[in-house]
Amino acid sequence: MARLWIQIVGSKKTGKTSLLERATRELVSRGRSVCYVKHSHEDARLDASDTDTSRLMKAGAAAAALVGDSSTIVFRRSTGQPLPTVAISDSLPGEIVLVEGFKGLAGSKIVVTGGDLDVDALEGVVAVVGEAPIGFQGETIAPDDTGALCDLVEKLADSGGGDVWTTSLVMDGREIRLNAFVQDMMASGLLGMASALDGVDGADTMQIRCTRKRSG
């Protein structure tokens, strides 16, 4: 079960995937189980064009996910488990989930500088890789210092990663099992959507109830 999921964000062509590739190898060599999630602005497809997920799988990630606008593909290593077990609740088995992108989503972030991304406009930034913007008070890591980056990731994982949501999902009276990553993703996504509404300025607890009205 994931202890930490952390977003690595930055402008295009700033070396995010290469950084994650090195970090994954280092974390795996330290005995950590790592998964990788990539945000795509296009529809996720099963072809060779998505080289980033294949690179991270080759680096040792236990699973990698490509999230598109209308579909999500999760790649994971075969474990011989029956098909029903390979579901969303089990599809990201790593204790550390490294997420490339999703800069608008709530959660802890490490920013790779060097582009036109406004670090000050982001929420949850715990560190920058590269040159820190003026006035930044968080940790600054050199682009080639993979060890320092992994030290920070492990520190966050072992400390619980800061604010983490506990989420339960009940459908037709039956509670659905969710791993920690999915719990945090669902709650953070709901909070992000709700925060766009007038009068909503964060929350520590949320409740939502959906009832389908069948036609006919």
Image (cartoon, rainbow, N blue to C red):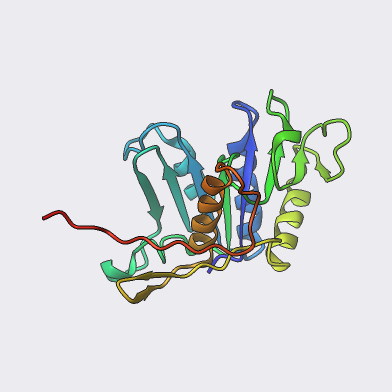
Residue extending farthest to the left is 216
Residue 18 rendering spot, x and y as whole percentages:
61, 37
Q: Is residue 174 above or below residue 118?
A: below
Residue 61 rendering spot, x and y as whole percentages:
51, 54
Q: Is residue 1 above or below residue 68?
A: below
Q: How many marks?
A: 0
Q: In front here: 200 or 103?
A: 200
Residue extending farthest to the front is 199
Identify the residue at image location x=36%, y=62%.
Answer: 78
Q: In front here: 103 or 132?
A: 103
Residue 20 rendering spot, x and y as whole percentages:
61, 44
Identify the residue at image location x=56%, y=47%.
Answer: 192
Q: In front here: 155 or 178?
A: 178
Left or right: residue 18 compared with residue 139: left
* Whether residue 83 can be seen here: yes
In which quadrant of the rendered view does residue 22 lie? top right
Identify the residue at image location x=73%, y=67%.
Answer: 159
Identify the residue at image location x=87%, y=43%.
Answer: 137
Left or right: residue 9 compared with residue 155: left
Residue 161 rendering spot, x and y as whole percentages:
69, 61
Quadrant in the picture for the C terminus: bottom left
* Whether residue 60 can be seen here: no
